[in-house]
């Protein structure tokens, strides 16, 4: 039986009979950046002899309706796969999601588009990352797109696992809304430990909520840096239609092209760059 939450989040797409998500108006913007990243890394994929993998561990059903505008948009895995299709396609598209109906719909949509070499997994991002990592070509060029609804679904172990690959760029959405709302309760309950292990060494518990959020985020970025990741300085803060901050978009890479790539990706909406 679908829950009330499911009914608010999903519906059947009358065009293809598959599940689609119902999302806020900011989804196209994050997809635009993903598309741009995939576009500008086409030459890198070429250099790697097309030995490149796209990994989407929170793939959703692959299509969505914008709740207010009503537009129908592709989901992240479809955006990345179709963008790459004509310019050094990914050798493999790996999709995963906790919800089996999302995995099924996303896989089916990729199949119907003729996107070959899709591997699909149902499970938490942590489980799927653990399964996938040993199967990757050790010298391949990989992008992992990490797009959870909330902080709780993004344990740092996901990043630690993926970071074991030699070339693993990360495009990560961190929900500011969720951190702002829940940072204190996550500290108390221990849930923050999974997202940002060791936070208590650098975060001042007595700080105001917004300072706490910034300190936790800073700590999380330093964890990424300690794994050899360079994090683009101009992190995007994407705002919703009431101008409320929604999430940060972080591009992390172990090569010094990260800043250059991000400079190009973020030219989509330069006025929104805040850092
Ligand atoms: C924001 S949506 C993803 C949207 C998708 N990336 C897109 O742009 O089309 C987040 C997804 O994460 C899934 N999810 C929630 N908790 C998860 C977890 N711990 N591991 C993997 N997926 C999870 C949800 O089922 C949902 O499909």
Image (tube, helix red, strand yellow):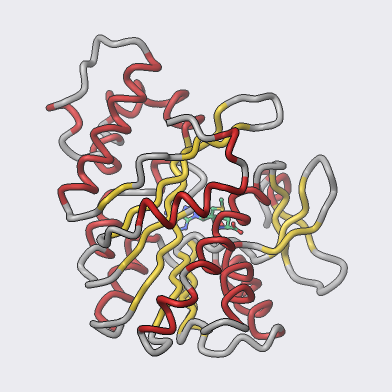
Front residue of this view, candidates 31 and 209: 31
Number of dots carrying numbers: 0
Residue 60 in the figure: left or right of residue 4: left
The residue positioned 22% from the left and 72% from the top of the image is 166
Quarter of the picture containing the C terminus is: top left
Residue 90 in the figure: left or right of residue 61: left
The residue positioned 47% from the left and 24% from the top of the image is 181
Residue 199 found in image quarter: top left
Up the image or down, 179 lies above or below 48; here it is above
Residue 14, horizontal then vertical, whole percent: 87, 67
Residue 62 in the figure: left or right of residue 177: right
Residue 117 in the figure: left or right of residue 31: left
Up the image or down, 98 lies above or below 51; here it is above
The residue positioned 42% from the left and 65% from the top of the image is 123
Quarter of the picture containing the N terminus is: bottom right
Up the image or down, 108 lies above or below 39; here it is below
Front residue of this view, candidates 256 and 235: 256
The residue positioned 64% from the left and 79% from the top of the image is 110
Residue 136, horizontal then vertical, whole percent: 30, 81
Residue 169, horizontal then vertical, whole percent: 35, 63
Residue 189, horizontal then vertical, whole percent: 29, 29
């Amino acid at each position: 039986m679908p829950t009330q939450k499911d009914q608010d989040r999903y519906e059947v797409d009358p065009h293809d009979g598959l599940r689609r998500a119902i999302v806020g108006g900011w989804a196209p913007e994050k997809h635009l950046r993903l598309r741009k990243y995939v576009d500008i890394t086409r030459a890198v994929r070429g250099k790697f002899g097309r030995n490149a993998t796209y990994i989407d561990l929170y793939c959703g059903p692959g299509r969505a309706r914008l709740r207010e505008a009503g537009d129908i948009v592709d989901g992240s895995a479809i955006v990345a796969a179709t963008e790459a299709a004509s310019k050094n396609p990914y050798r493999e598209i790996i999709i995963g999601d906790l919800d089996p109906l999302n995995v099924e719909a996303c896989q089916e949509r990729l199949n119907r588009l003729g996107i070959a070499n899709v591997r699909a997994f149902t499970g938490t991002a942590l489980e799927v990352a653990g399964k996938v990592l040993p199967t990757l070509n050790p010298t391949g060029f990989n992008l992992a797109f990490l797009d959870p609804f909330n902080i709780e679904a993004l344990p740092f172990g996901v990043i630690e696992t993926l970071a074991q690959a030699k070339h693993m760029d990360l495009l990560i959405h961190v929900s500011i809304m969720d951190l702002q709302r829940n940072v204190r309760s996550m500290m108390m309950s221990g849930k923050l430990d999974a997202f940002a292990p060791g936070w208590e060494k650098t975060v001042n518990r007595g700080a105001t909520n917004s300072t706490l959020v910034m300190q936790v985020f800073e700590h999380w970025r330093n964890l990424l840096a300690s794994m050899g990741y360079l994090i683009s300085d101009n992190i995007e803060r994407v705002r919703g239609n009431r101008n409320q901050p929604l999430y940060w978009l972080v591009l992390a890479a172990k090569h010094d092209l990260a800043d250059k790539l991000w400079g190009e990706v973020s030219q989509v909406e330069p006025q929104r760059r805040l850092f």
